[in-house]
């Protein structure tokens, strides 16, 4: 699961960490990993959410087992630069667009 936080003030709770932040964060969690991403009550936030199964990703990404270590046992929160956020957003939008192309 990938949550790309684009804007707004959020609270991120993983089993082993708590972070309050805004903008340019990515939250990575394996399936069934407990986590919460909520916005502060005085503001809204914008995010892109991508959910996939291990079967799906391992079919398309043979090195998934090695890469999944980045997600960590309890998930991970990674601070990004604005340009990194833009790159990841573009990649996710390409994946999302491809999903619809495969259905046609």
Image (cartoon, rainbow, N blue to C red):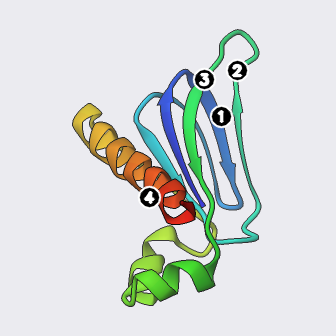
User: Residue 50: x percent and y percent?
Assistant: 57, 54
How many numbered badges does the structure rendering display? 4
Give the number of the mark in front: 2 or 4: 4
For disc 2, the marked residue is: 40
Mark pair 3, 1: CA separation: 11 Å
For disc 3, the marked residue is: 45
* N-terminal-most mark, 3 or 1: 1
Give the number of the mark in front: 3 or 1: 3
For disc 1, the marked residue is: 11
**Most distant residue in the front direction:** 104
The correct choice, above or below, for 85 with respect to 103 in the image is: above
Residue at x 64% of width, y 75% of height: 53
As drawn, the label of residue 98 is: 4
Quadrant the C terminus occupies: bottom right
The correct choice, above or below, for 57 with respect to 19 in the image is: below
* N-terminal-most mark, 4 or 3: 3
The answer to whether mark 1 and mark 2 are in CB contact below 8 A is yes
Mark pair 2, 4: CA separation: 33 Å
């Amino acid at each position: 699961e990938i949550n790309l936080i684009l804007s707004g003030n959020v609270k991120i709770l993983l089993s082993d960490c708590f972070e309050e932040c805004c903008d340019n964060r990515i939250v990575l969690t394996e399936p069934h990993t407990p986590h919460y991403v909520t916005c502060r009550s005085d503001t809204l936030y914008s995010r892109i959410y991508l959910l996939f199964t291990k079967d799906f990703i391992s079919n398309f990404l043979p090195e998934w087992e090695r890469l999944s270590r980045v997600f960590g046992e309890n998930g991970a929160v990674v601070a990004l630069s604005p340009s990194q956020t833009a790159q990841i957003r573009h990649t996710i939008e390409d994946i999302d667009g491809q999903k619809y192309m495969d259905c046609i």
